[in-house]
């Protein structure tokens, strides 16, 4: 394959002299950057949150609607509400349980965590810190809802939405406080004070 980059023993794939790095860049196929990259791989995200979010964003979770297609599941009813077909869209955006959890978290932090189906409004949050907070909350919510789905399926236990929202809030508060650093603008400080992350 590298032969295509040569003509008469001269490296012609780029104007530079051949280097291993140049050859590697030429060989690999560059994909357009996905708009969810920052959301899933935000530096503040816990690895377990990031991994579940990456699967969600790539429609890779083994929800019942998918398992049923492969004959791995006897029914497609949602593990949480036991009413509708358990697709990713249902589980995270249409299931009454998930809606209640998200509503409680959104009431607390004062902004929409999920906008549309798989988007976060973190991109328009203003500052880097605000973006990181948005992305962290998005991934925390979706990770914990997925855990409740598993808990409901395996152990037949489901936390009340209020309890799960409280766990998410506590985790978010702890994470932000550990990551926030010393340099916070007045605007960011008052933003975090509104929902109790920072003291007055
Ligand atoms: Zn449901």
Image (cartoon, rainbow, N blue to C red):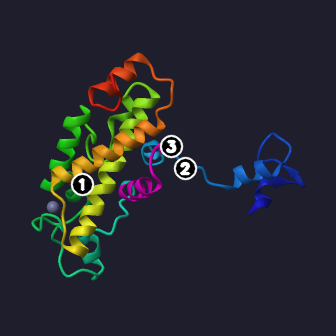
* SS at mark 1 in the image: helix
In depth, the one of 84 and 195 nearer the eye is 195
- Which residue has dot 3 on it? 43
Upstream in sequence: badge 3 or badge 2: 2
Say which of marks 3 and 1 sits in front: 3
Dot 1 alpha-carbon crowd within 10 angstroms: few under 14, some 14 to 19, many 20 or more = many
Q: Residue at x 33, y 55 (%)?
A: 143
Say which of marks 3 and 2 sits in front: 3
Residue positioned most to the left: 83
- First to last magenta residue range: 42-56
Q: CA distance from mark 1 to mark 2?
A: 28 Å
Upstream in sequence: badge 1 or badge 2: 2
In depth, the one of 136 and 90 nearer the eye is 136
* SS at mark 3 in the image: loop
Seen in the image, is 93 located left or right of residue 48?
A: left
- Which residue has dot 2 on it? 31
Query: In terms of image quadrants, where is residue 174?
Result: top left
Quadrant location, ligand no. 1: bottom left
Q: CA distance from mark 3 to mark 2?
A: 22 Å
Query: In terms of image quadrants, where is residue 191?
Result: top left
Above or below, comparing residue 199 to residue 146 in the picture: above
* Residue 93 image offset from top left, x and y in percent: 21, 51
Seen in the image, is 15 located left or right of residue 49?
A: right
Dot 2 alpha-carbon crowd within 10 angstroms: few under 14, some 14 to 19, many 20 or more = few
Q: Is residue 51 magenta?
A: yes
Q: Is residue 94 visible?
A: no
* Magenta span main SS: helix
* Residue 1 image offset from top left, x and y in percent: 74, 63
* Residue 91 image offset from top left, x and y in percent: 22, 59
Seen in the image, is 99 located left or right of residue 113?
A: left
Q: Residue at x 35, y 40 (%)?
A: 173
């Amino acid at each position: 394959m590298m032969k295509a980059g040569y003509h008469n023993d001269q490296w012609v794939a780029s104007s530079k002299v051949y280097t291993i790095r140049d050859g590697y860049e030429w060989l690999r196929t560059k994909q357009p950057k996905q708009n969810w990259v920052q959301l899933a791989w935000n530096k503040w995200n816990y690895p377990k949150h990031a991994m579940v979010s990456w699967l969600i964003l790539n429609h890779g979770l083994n929800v019942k609607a998918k398992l049923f297609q492969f004959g791995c599941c006897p029914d497609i009813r949602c593990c949480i509400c036991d009413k509708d077909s358990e697709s990713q869209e249902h589980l995270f955006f249409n299931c009454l349980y998930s809606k209640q959890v998200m509503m409680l978290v959104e009431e607390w932090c004062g902004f929409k965590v999920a906008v549309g189906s798989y988007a976060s409004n973190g991109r328009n949050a203003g500052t880097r810190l605000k973006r990181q907070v948005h992305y962290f909350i998005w991934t925390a919510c979706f990770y914990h809802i997925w855990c409740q789905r598993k808990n409901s399926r395996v152990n037949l236990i489901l936390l009340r939405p209020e309890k799960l929202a409280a766990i998410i809030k506590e985790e978010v508060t702890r994470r932000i406080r550990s990551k926030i650093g010393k340099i916070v603008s007045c605007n960011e400080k008052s933003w975090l004070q509104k929902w109790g992350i920072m003291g007055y």
